[in-house]
Image (cartoon, helix red, strand yellow):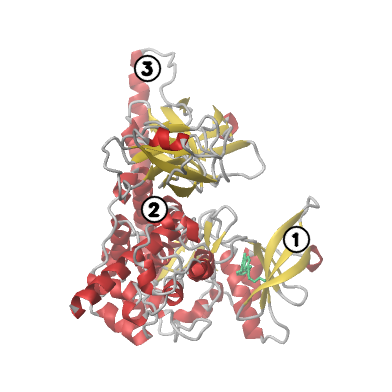
Amino acid sequence: MVDNKSSVVTLTWQPPDNNGGRNDIAYWIDCPLCPPDTEFSPRQHDIPGLEVNVSRLESHTTYEFLVYAVNGVSEQSMATGVKQEHIVINATTFSSVPSAVREVSIDEESSSKTTLGLMWKVPMFPNGVITTYQIRYRTTVETVADSKYHYQNHQAHSEVQRTQVTGLQQGTDYVFSIAATTKAGVGEYSTPFVARTEGGPKNAPYGPAIIAGAVAAVFVIMVLVAVVIFLLICWRRRKANQLYLKIASCPNNGKKEMPPTANGMIYSNGPNGEAVILPHIGKARTYIDPFTYEDPVQAVREFATEIDASCIRILDVIGGGEFGDVCSGLMLMPDKSTRKVAVKTLKTGASDKDRADFLSEASIMGQFDDPNVIELLGVVTRTRPAMIVTEYMENRSLDTFLKENDGKFSVPQLISMMRGIASGMRYLSEMNFVHRDLAARNILVSSTLVCKVADFGLSRRKHEGAYETKGGKIPIRWTAPEAIAFKKFTSASDVWSYGIVMWEIMSYGERPYWNWPNQDVIRAVEKGYRLPPPMDCPEALHQLMLDCWQKDRNHRPTFSTIVSTLDRLTRNPHALRPLAKAGVNQMNNSFTDLTQLHSVTEWLDSIKMGRYKDTFSQAGYVRLEDIARLSQGDLPRLGVNLVGHQKKIMKSIHSIRSHLEQAEETLV
Ligand code: 32W
């Protein structure tokens, strides 16, 4: 077993079948490649028990451990040159978590009464690629348990990292600790750092009477301001309601007939998919449907930057789209550097409608600014072909990425992917944007495993008339029942889809409801059937999925609650210990029907471990009976070094074993 937090390996073994008639048995570990300062606990030689912890190993390294059973006469047999029996255990360590960040200090320039700017240096030993920083903070009167958390993405190529923690009380002391996060988990927290927000009762040079008078005056002013704000809000609500009613009762409520902006108000689809009018204050906090613009080119002008085609060099085709190819490319930046980008192109000969639909995706994407939403860099509309240029995501789409990396991630890593998606969706729902096609295939993964929500371009007009995706059908398996039945697409129906994405993540890209036909899926879900926990899925995560799949959409959590729940689980790994148990009938769904399997090759294919077919057959494992006696310790010799794969194979071997035993009993 390998502890992925600290590169500690725990070796366990079984006593030999034959103890030579003696009770003074002990064990000896030999590790030819271990570093000289490797620690063995309780010790390396004469171990009385059946377990040893090996620490101070290198990250990402495979070690061979030889375990010898010895007794009082072993020395004599060694002296006579008799070869000692031993077993070999191979174990590969993960990376250790990063060491603490250094030199935390306050960034005065970005601090104010309610915000503190912080700076720090990256850890001395990152032990991997840092993705984010977790900033834990509390006031000095609160305890650690009351701490709040703030997250900051790692800024590449910079030794000094910065963030701003907002929403603080003025004139208050806060204690900050910062930890870097890599694939291996959350690192060591820095020593607590105290910083004070500006303002408040700092060093008041006045007498108590003056202070009391000032406090009373401030109080009166605040009451007056509160009354004025309250009246203003009431007045605005009434006005907005009047406008809303006017639109809602309009017989022809087509968005194209709506002026995009009127009296400083903007038109949008509301959190429940309905029309709402919202005040347009400062930076847009609400998504504007580009189809409310008479001219889609006007929308794209408003929301996207025009790029000169000469700044783009196409490299490879990386995918196909409804309107043309998706390519990787290089973009020449204003500082003459180049940046790798993704370029969606509009095929030649596209109709005006196709062009409008194509550009609508850029108009939507251009309104978003969030680390978990794909970033639009610009558009090419003045020359042909038209292009949409976005950031490039090295690890492509999440479904493909998971399938290609089956079993390779720890639960905290998988939760970190889920958190990223939930956070991106929280942002989109706060912008009153309903995605309608949230699925692992529409999530892109960066080189540092950051997940970003993408694909806003199918047909945003799908709420009018039939909802058709690229494939011409509703993505039934991902879609909430009320959206399938009566097209009620809301952020709550996005939450349902999010639950399916969680399931896709935990099952490494398995198809939801396997190969069931769509009609069977609809019927089963309607009757209350829900997807079972994927293999090795913590109960708490399956429970969160089930919460997302509540029939009544009002009972589903919001994306904000989902983010908080995932953060709580990350902070409290004990809550992830109990694994969900798959029910008997559910097991049949997620596992292959064993009666249909006749060879080791078929079996490995059925559990998506086909890559080990050659090593198993070379070692003489052909019939299912041959593998029934294998133990986890045998797997490295068959080339299975990944702990995730070992677990998957062992779990299946256990089912095969009981299946074969049952078959035998039936024959008797
Ligand atoms: O390896 C890949 N494909 C297999 C075939 O290659 C020859 C692959 C690698 C990276 C990406 C995709 C596939 N990354 C990536 N894909 C995107 C993207 C950003 N990164 C796909 C679409 C878009 C952005 C996009 C979406 C909407 N509008 C514009 C662009």
Mark 3 belongs to which amino acid?
A: Ile
**Hey, what amino acid is under mark 1?**
Met
Q: Is mark 1 within 8 Å of ligand 1?
A: no
- Residue occupying image coordinates x 27% and y 72%: 659
Answer with the quadrant where ligand 1 appears in the image: bottom right
Give the number of marks: 3
C-alpha distance separating marks 1 and 2? 34 Å
Residue 654: horizontal and vertical position, in percent?
31, 64
The answer to whether the residues at label 1 and label 2 have Cβ atoms under 8 Å apart is no
Residue 492 % position (x, y): 35, 67
Q: Position of residue 77 (x, y in %)?
A: 42, 37
Label 1, residues with CA under 10 Å away: few <14, some 14-19, many ≥20: many
In the image, taking residue 591 as reference, residue 82 lies left or right, namely right
Describe the element under mark 2 as helix, strand or loop. helix
Q: Which mark is residue 563?
A: 2
Mark 1 or mark 2: which comes first in sequence?
1
Query: Regarding mark 1 in the picture, which secondary structure is present there?
Result: strand
Badge 3 or badge 2: first in the primary sequence: 3
Q: Which mark is residue 331?
A: 1
Q: Nearer the viewer, mark 3 or mark 2?
A: 2
* Residue corresponding to mark 3: 210
Q: Is residue 252 above or below residue 245?
A: below
Lateral position of residue 163 relative to residue 662, left or right = right
- Taking the spot 33% from the left edge, 44% from the top edge, the residue there is 572
Could you tell me how far apart the alpha carbons at marks 3 and 2 are, in whole angstroms? 46 Å
